[in-house]
Amino acid sequence: MTDLELATHAALTAGKLLHQHFGSDATVDEATHHDIKLALDKESQELITEILLGARDGDALYGEEGIAGNQESNRQWIVDPIDGTVNFFYGIPHFCVSIALRVDGEIVVGVIHDPMVGETWTVEKGSPAMLNGTPIQASKRDRLEDSILYVGCGKDEESLRTGLERFRKGSLKARKMRMMGSAALGMAYIASGRLDGYIESRISLWDIAAGQLLVETAGGKVDLTPIPNKPDSWSIVATNGRIPIEEVL
């Protein structure tokens, strides 16, 4: 089984688990003002870990719910077991499983699986970006007034303030603005030509690792700026590579 096939298998298997539990009472492990952690987040990551490291026992795994495997390895799986946990908890069917593989510091495989809609985005470096086995491309829209933008607001006061100001500016210029609650799906939608841009001032690596390779392979552009003193936390601007997103920043 190739790395891409393995990642796809892990994402689909975790997706079945999430689909089975969607709409049922979920156990909350941790709740803050702007976020929720579920027991199912951990269960999903444990399932993914078992599949990935069971087949690649020398690899490392770095996920939202912790690390596993050989952390000295040059091969690192980057996992978000439920991207959109708050959506899941509130019964909103917009969430996904995101898995990427980083080798020697470079993302080479990405899978994003939406278990509710039944869509799976896959990409391997050097090969086309795919949605359910069909090649995809970012949109060709090049005017901001024709575009649909997704703005994330983060969870701290500064990120919220920045995100809301960008949403205000974008609302005056773009055709439509969206806040959707899943960074990975937002990037998958850019790769598919459904959205034209995604901006967030603070996001974690596991949210965007698979999506970065997907967007760039589909003809888009991703700019990441490290957040000082926050390892693997980034400010992100992802677009179809054509719209003048700087007018919103």
Image: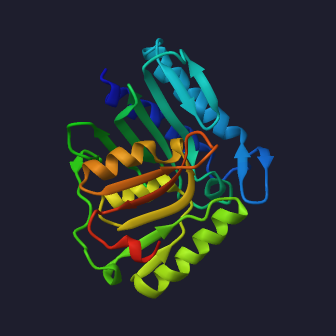
Which residue occupies the foreground of this view, 145 or 29? 145
Instruction: Look at 53% across and 74% down and name the residue there.
Output: 166
Decide: is 80 above or below 73: below
Decide: is 56 above or below 110: above
Q: State the scheme by which the image is colored.
A: rainbow
Q: Report x, y in % for residue 238.
A: 39, 59
Which of the 4 quarters of the picture holds residue 82?
Answer: top right
Instruction: Look at 41% across and 43% down and name the residue there.
Output: 210
Instruction: Look at 32% across and 42% down and name the residue there.
Output: 122
Instruction: Look at 49% across and 15% down and name the residue there.
Output: 54
Left or right: 126 as drawn, with respect to 40: left
Q: Report x, y in % for residue 26.
A: 73, 47
Q: Is residue 12 visible?
A: no
Q: Residue furthest front?
A: 228
Q: Is residue 189 visible?
A: yes
Left or right: 95 as drawn, with respect to 89: left
Which residue occupies the foreground of this view, 157 or 147? 157
Q: Report x, y in % for residue 208.
A: 47, 47
Q: How many discs appear?
A: 0
Q: Report x, y in % for residue 124.
A: 28, 36
Name the quarter where the N terminus is drawn: top left
Q: Residue furthest bottom?
A: 172
Q: Residue furthest top?
A: 58
